[in-house]
Amino acid sequence: MDPQPDTSPAPAPTPLPAPPAFLPPLAQPAAPNTYDLAPVGIFVPIAPAPMAPGQLTPAWRTLFIAGWVGVMLGFGAVWQSGRVSGISPWWLGPATNQRLFVIIAIPFVAPALAVLAGIARLRITCYVGIAAAIATAAVALADRSQYPGIAAVESALAAAGLLISIGSFAGRMRRPD
């Protein structure tokens, strides 16, 4: 005996309910190139402003900032290696009698200012970087007589910052001809 297939119609699927409306529809900006606080409370950003002559292009700006962050990380490595090895540069002082935090922060101030100049998109960012490299080299000069190895590393960090800053001149926006 062969079973007969079921020929009864399948029940119709029930439609899914509409999804809940969590967010109101997006509002269009009132005018192009303006910020608009839409009535629904959604902030609509504008298109990026055109860059002025002297500003770094986005790629060079990223390279500049990353390079100077690397210099700051290098000084952190000098700090850590000085503590581990028992020798310390002038700005750290001996492990048993550490210097004030303001003095310990001196090597980090100039690179931090260069990073802030890059973030702020200043037109003088490259010049700030060169000044920061000179200040970083001055930190290395103070360690030259007592700890020449640490001074060499600090000088290499200053040279790296200087090369990044000089190289960034290639990424500056030019005046339209």
Image (cartoon, helix red, strand yellow):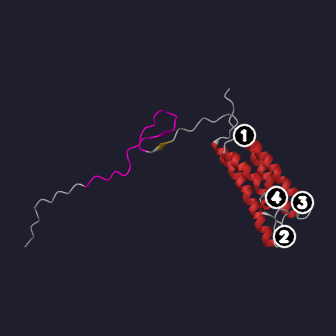
Q: Give the number of the mark in front: 1 or 2.
A: 2
Q: Nearer the viewer, residue 100 or 61?
A: 100
Which comes sooner in the sequence, label 4 or label 3? 3
Q: Secondary structure at mark 2?
A: loop
Residue range in magenta is: 16-40
Q: Give the number of the mark in front: 1 or 4.
A: 4
Residue 170 tag number: 1
Q: Amino acid at mark 3?
A: Arg
Looking at the picture, does residue 77 appear above or below residue 159?
below
Q: Amino acid at mark 4?
A: Glu
As measured in the structure, the alpha-carbon distance from the residue carrying label 3 to the one carrying label 1 is: 33 Å
Query: Label 1: few (<14), some or many (≥20) within 10 Å?
Result: few
Q: Name the residue beneath numbered marker 4.
A: 154
Which comes sooner in the sequence, label 1 or label 2? 2
Q: Residue at x 80, y 46 (%)?
A: 131
As measured in the structure, the alpha-carbon distance from the residue carrying label 4 to the one carrying label 2 is: 18 Å
